[in-house]
Structure formats: C-alpha cells, structure tokens
Image: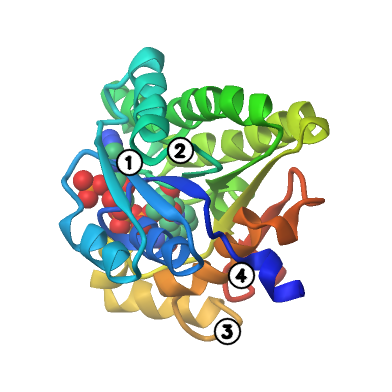
Amino acid sequence: MILDRFRLDGRVALVTGGNRGIGRALAIALAQAGADIALLDRTHPTRTVADIEATGRRALVVPGDLATAGPDELADAVHAVVTGLGGLHILVNNAGIIRRAVAVAHPAEDWDAVLRVNLNAVFHLSQAAGRIMLDQGHGKIVNIASMLSYQGGIRVPSYTAAKHAVVGLTRALANEWAAAGVNVNAIAPGYVATDNTAPLREDPDRERAIRERIPAGRWGAPDDLTGAIVFLASDAAHYVHGVVVPVDGGWLAR
Ligand code: NDP
C-alpha cells in the first residue's frame, strides 16, 4: 500500500537543532510517522522530547555545539545515536544560524561561525552517518537549505554562501551514494516565522513587503515543512536523489 511506504516505524532519525523552530517541527513529525528520534542540540530540548514521547516514540538527546564540535566529536555523536537507539537510518541537518552584516563589515568570527554550523557540521555529520548508511545499504539524509541557496540575499553573505554550498554538497553526496541505496536530498524553506526571521517581522514595512512578495500570501509555519521531510525520509522517496524541494509558498516560482 502506498501510504505504508511513508511510514517510518522501526527507523531512527537524528535531527540537529530540534530545540525550537523548524527542527522541532521536523522531529515531532518524524516521530508521528513512526521513527525514534535523536536530537543533537546545544540546549536541552525539553519541550521537543516531551512531544516526541507523547507520540509513543523514543527520544534521545545528544548534547553538542555545532559551532565548536570537530569531525571526531560529531562522529562520536553519531555513534552515540547508534548505541542509544539501536541504529541510524535518517539524518536531518537542520541546525542553522544567521549573522546579518554587509560584506565589507562582516566580522571574521561570524563568517567562521556561520560556515561551521551551516556547512562544516553538515558535511562531518553526513560523512559519519554516511559510513553507517553505506554499510547497511540504505539511509536518508535531508539537508535544510534555503531560498538563499539560489539568491544573493540582503546583508547575509556568509549565510548565502553556506546555503549555496549545502546544495552543492547535497548533489555531490547524492551522486556518490545513490548506487549504494543512500538518498541525499534537501528542502529549501521560504520565509518561515521562527526566531531566525524575527528581526524581519519586527519591522512592519519589511514584514509586509515580504508577505506581499510570497505568492501564497503568508509567511510559512514550521509545520508547513513536515510533509516534505516525512516524504524524503521515507521509502516513498527511494528513487529521489540530489533534489532540493522548495517549500516556500511559491517564492522561487515568482
Ligand atoms: P531557529 O533560529 O528558530 O532555530 C535554530 C535551531 O538550531 C535551534 O534549535 C538552535 O538551538 C539550533 N542551533 C543553532 N546553533 C547551534 C549550534 N551551534 N549547535 C547546535 N544547535 C544549534 O531557526 P529556524 O528553525 O528558522 O531554522 C532552521 C533551519 O532552517 C536553518 O538551517 C535555517 O537556515 C533554515 N531556514 C530557515 C528559514 C526561515 O525562514 N526560518 C528559511 C530558510 C532556511 P538553540 O535553541 O540552542 O539556539
């Protein structure tokens, strides 16, 4: 039955940045679809753990700061998931930060932090998870990209550079790993109302200008992304490799 292919029963998913915003919604949706969930977070994600457990699935918190963790520490985090929940089938590289500054005034430490969290950690976690997934002959990796994987953005050069690179990395890994049964894809959210975009919504003129530019006529909510994540994490997507699914209210179509 087709709907059975969307179920994630018996799967283990690792989600980064599940404490709030989009990552929290994605983690809960994956649990609702049947997966046990590991959360790699720098802040203990108490509410998300409670909501996952309310679905009847297991939740495991793996403490970690993606801005400082190196490849070995991230590989240890992946192995802690396998030890704690008995396997790893899905990796969602969601955690991300943004630093707003014009290019000529962009502090070097902000550039480094954005690249570490938004790109380097995506690679190192994918590498560690990929080794496990290649050995077992199946796995799903979903990277959270952005509209700024395609556009230049305004005063966010480090974020834009990292999100462009995430799409390149998604395609590179998909190309290497598709034949071994590992799917690597991405989701490109549009403007979603989270803490990340709060500064844009504090200015009523800016908020309205963005809203009016979105064909759907409203900002996205974290839950708008849950259908795409369950699809890409499931067997229903077994022949889908290296794509970026825009979930943006039509922003890129305009
Ligand atoms: P939020 O700022 O609301 O949440 C970010 C999450 O990432 C938090 O859980 C945060 O943890 C975690 N995080 C941040 N830094 C680190 C770190 N160093 N180590 C571990 N975890 C960390 O962002 P969104 O939910 O809006 O964004 C999620 C993803 O979606 C990001 O990759 C973002 O770039 C992308 N995106 C968002 C869009 C939007 O409009 N909101 C649009 C396009 C893409 P903590 O709670 O501890 O800070």
Is residue 237 among the parts visible in the rendering? yes
How many C-alpha atoms fall within 10 Å of the one at disc 3: few (<14), some, or many (≥20)? few
Amino acid type of the residue tagged 2 in the rendering = Pro
Point out the tag, 4 or 1, that comes first from the N-terminus: 1
Point out the tag, 3 or 4, that comes first from the N-terminus: 3
Amino acid type of the residue tagged 4 in the rendering = Trp
- Residue picked out by circle 4: 251
| Marks 3,4: beta carbons within 8 A | no
What's the residue at 55%, 76% (across, down)? 213
How far apart are the two marked residues, 1 and 2, measured between alpha carbons? 8 Å
The residue lying furthest to the bottom in this view is 217
Label tally: 4
How many C-alpha atoms fall within 10 Å of the one at disc 4: few (<14), some, or many (≥20)? some
Horizontal relation, residue 181 to residue 109: left or right: right
How far apart are the two marked residues, 2 and 4, measured between alpha carbons? 20 Å
* Badge 3 element: loop
How far apart are the two marked residues, 3 and 4, measured between alpha carbons? 8 Å
- Residue picked out by circle 1: 101
Front: mark 1 or 3: 3
Could you say which is closer to the camera, residue 65 or residue 12?
Answer: 12
- Residue picked out by circle 3: 216
* Badge 4 element: helix
When the figure is inspected, residue 73 is found, relative to residue 175, above or below; the finding is: above
Point out the tag, 1 or 3, that comes first from the N-terminus: 1
Disc assigned to residue 157: 2
Q: What colouring style does the render use?
A: rainbow
What's the residue at 23%, 71% (across, down)? 202
How far apart are the two marked residues, 1 and 3, measured between alpha carbons? 29 Å
* Badge 1 element: loop
Front: mark 2 or 4: 4
